[in-house]
Amino acid sequence: ESTQELTNIERAWPGAHAIERADGTMEAYVELEPSNMDFAMSDDWAAVQEAAETFANNEIEFPVSLYVTTRSFPVEEIISQLESRLYDDDVRENPVFGELIEEYRERRPSELTDVQECHYYLGVEADRMEIYRRYETEKTPIERLAEFPVIGFLFNPFVAGRIELEEAQIRTTLFEKLDDRIRTVRSEFVDNMTGWS
């Protein structure tokens, strides 16, 4: 099996920061780095939820996907950072800091054994039919049938066949739509979340 068969990805477009699926739909992703909320109060969590809800209900007019991947927490890296702190002047001058770091160095590996580090990705997409629908004035009966949920896809070839566009034009327009949508995600969601990038 090839990677394309497993992932449904036809091609990557690195210059446009996009992925083309086998069905011709283009996708783009932005990695979300939320602020650390380990010690956040319930009001802080409610504010994040409200901001995400407002964005989802008021700003999104296109498909969005959220993916979360996990990796093992870098325990060794944390321990080496703690050990390097033991030799700092401020720690040597204050024995309480030294004891605290020693205790952390002993306890943290067992506490973090099964902890996973999460990485969040928000994806947007644009498909070819959006481009053809852009040129509509009044919809024909076939175009109306193409909008029906379960059977609509059967009529898409008839709708797409009415307008002659070159492949390069289609791709460029799809890339522009993706850029606009990523910009919307950044400006209307990520930038409004304190500490997020």
Image (cartoon, helix red, strand yellow):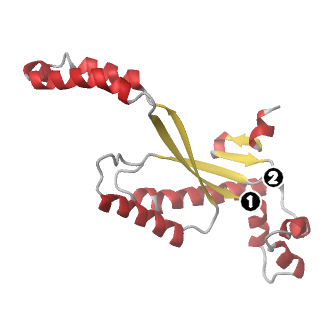
- Which mark identifies residue 127? 1
Dot 2: within a 10 Å radius of its alpha carbon, few (fewer than 14), some, or many (20 or more) residues?
Answer: few
Q: Between residues 76 and 33, which one lies in front from this camera angle?
A: 76
Please name the residue that numbered disc 2 is placed on.
23
Tell me: 181 left or right of 4: left
Residue pictured at 51% horizontal, 33% vertical: 71
Q: Is residue 167 above or below residue 58?
A: above
Tell me: 70 left or right of 111: right
Q: Secondary structure at mark 2?
A: loop
Find the distance from the CA under tag 2 to the CA under tag 1.
9 Å
Q: Is residue 122 above or below residue 58?
A: above
Toward which corner of the image does residue 179 lie, by quadrant? bottom right
Q: Amino acid at mark 1?
A: Asp
Assess whether mark 1 and mark 2 are in contact (beta carbons under 8 angstroms). Answer: yes
Dot 1: within a 10 Å radius of its alpha carbon, few (fewer than 14), some, or many (20 or more) residues?
Answer: many
Task: Give x and y (percent) for residue 111.
Answer: 36, 29
Q: Between residues 74 and 163, which one lies in front from this camera angle?
A: 74
Task: Give x and y (percent) for residue 21.
Answer: 76, 48
Q: Amino acid at mark 2?
A: Asp
Task: Give x and y (percent) for residue 33.
Answer: 44, 46
